Image: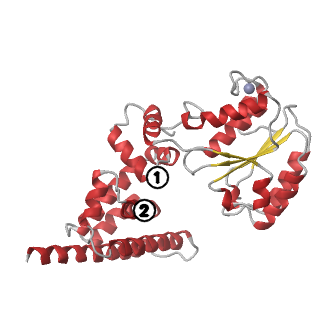
Amino acid sequence: MSLFEQTSRPPWPWQEAVWRRLHEQKQSDVLAHAYLFIGDRGTGRAEFAREFANFLLCGDPEAGRACYRCRSCRAGGADHHPDLLLILPEEGKKDIGVGQIRELAEFLSLNSFSGAGRVAIIPQAEALTLSASNALLKTLEEPAAGATLLLTACSPGSLLPTIRSRCQLLGLPGPDIDTATAWLRERLPDSHSVSDERLRELLAAYGNRPLELAPALSAGQAPGFIALRKMLLELLEGRTSILRSAGEAAKIGESEVFEHLSRISTILIRGLVNGDVCGAENRALAAALPASGELGFLLEFHRQVTRSRTLLAGPGNPNPQLLLESIFRLWVKAGRGSRSKAQLLNA
Ligand SMILES: [Zn+2]
């Protein structure tokens, strides 16, 4: 069972203002037919949309929230609500196809079973194909009575302007680092010993996305991130070998390793661009890189990490161990630059 079995539900503190606004609209009976929630991934926008759907369908809402006791809430909680439809890319696919949007149109046109209307959610609206977007446009142009469509996306620019203009756009802000740290702390059992300082550092590594970090902590992945960063420093300092590192990294799991490598290089690149690398360990790693051509090297490293991830996810069946060795070899090359620079300085 996850460490993060929901002990509380959205809206979370950073979402409360938007929730209040929606609640007021419901009270005044001026809800829109379609909403587009714009927010960063990992900050809970899909969970927010889902909770709002539960609220809309609840038979007996109290204090501006779903009651979680009525028949409708119990069905919604078990994911079997007959008036609720969730549209995600089908298994093994990255896109939402036109067939799924036709099903959605049919679903929304039917009468509500509960009498509270029908709600459909598209949590990753950027996954709509062009033909699916065009089909959705029709649904948006002729909304069925009592039907509400909830879309979420990272940026409005990822959707057709015609779709955006037919939805009410609501920005869902993410948390600041203190709120996110407190939120995670509340959800971690006491037995999970991690200091606030470490939590803040991990949050920074995860782009301040608590909902992305939560399952990683739960699955014990965050230590993988820390182990890998240490490995990269030791490689730069010549304290370990490529083969040994690749062997150790394989124990963490290749796909997770490349995910962490992508995170680490993003932190370092962002730090170089903004002039601020957060976290002492990240700073130590940044300091160990050669000062000249650092950005160019990191961009190339990041590009190769992304390429390896694409290869691993593709059908080509590449040798993960070789990919790991090759990425560490590239990393060590940068280390040679820094050591020779240090040797020159010492000479
Ligand atoms: Zn209820």
Please tell me how crowded label 2 is: few (under 14), some (14-19), or many (20+) other residues with Cα within 10 Å: some
| Cβ–Cβ under 8 Å for marks 1 and 2 | yes
In percent of width and height, residue 225 lies at 37, 55
- Which mark, residue 207? 1
In percent of width and height, residue 72 lies at 77, 30
Please tell me how crowded label 1 is: few (under 14), some (14-19), or many (20+) other residues with Cα within 10 Å: some
Disc 1 beta carbon < 8 A from ligand 1? no
In whole angstroms, how far apart are the C-alphas of marks 1 and 2? 9 Å
Q: Amino acid at mark 1?
A: Gly
User: Relative to 162, is 202 above or below?
Assistant: above
In percent of width and height, residue 54 lies at 72, 34
Q: How many marks?
A: 2
Side (left or right) of 106 relative to 152: right
- Which mark, residue 266? 2
As helix, strand or loop, the secondary structure at mark 2 comes to helix
User: Relative to 297, is 29 above or below?
Assistant: above
- Figure coloring: secondary structure
x 85%, y 52%: residue = 140
Side (left or right) of 37 relative to 303: right
Side (left or right) of 21 relative to 147: left
Question: Tag 2 or tag 1, which sits nearer the N-term?
Answer: 1
User: Relative to 52, is 227 above or below?
Assistant: below
